Image: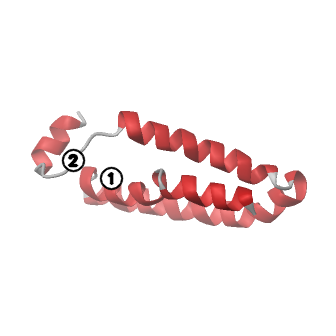
């Protein structure tokens, strides 16, 4: 149970909610549709593979997932740029 809680907490402060905000702010409509499609496909794949992984590795799956989410959180903290109150032109210059 502790691993589940740790996984959820780390996911919710890393790319869990941020991917939707960042996609909407920095991508074109075409890029946004591709990003949403990839996100949904990978979410479905993770859901389908979860039972297989739990059978093979047990609770260690949560620790591995929490580790990846921690890395994503560190990535967001240090490498993602603030886009609050910026125009689309300023955002495109920021990420070019």
Residue 63, image x, y percentages? 72, 48
> In the displayed image of the protein, which residue is found farthest to the front?
2
Please say whether residue 50 is visible from this viewpoint: yes
Q: CA distance from mark 2 to mark 1?
A: 9 Å
Of the residues under marks 2 and 1, which one precedes in the sequence?
1
Q: Is residue 40 above or below residue 81?
A: below
Horizontal side of 51 relative to 37 (left or right) equals right
Q: Quadrant of residue 31?
A: bottom left
Label of residue 22 in the image: 1
| Residue at image mark 2 | 83
> In the displayed image of the protein, which residue is found farthest to the right?
56
Please name the residue shown 81% across and 65% down the image.
51
Label of residue 78 in the image: none
Observer-nearest residue: 87 or 11? 11
Horizontal side of 1 relative to 36 (left or right) equals right
Tag 1's secondary structure? helix
Please name the residue shown 67% across and 49% down the image.
65
């Amino acid at each position: 149970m502790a691993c589940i809680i740790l996984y959820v907490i780390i996911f919710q402060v890393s790319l869990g909610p941020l991917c939707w905000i960042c996609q909407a702010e920095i991508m074109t409509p075409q890029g946004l549709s591709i990003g949403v499609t990839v996100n949904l496909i990978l979410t479905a794949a993770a859901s389908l593979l979860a039972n297989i992984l739990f059978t093979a590795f047990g609770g260690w799956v949560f620790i591995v997932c929490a580790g990846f989410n921690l890395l994503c959180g560190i990535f967001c903290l240090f490498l993602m740029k603030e886009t609050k109150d910026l125009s689309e032109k300023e955002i495109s210059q920021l990420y070019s």
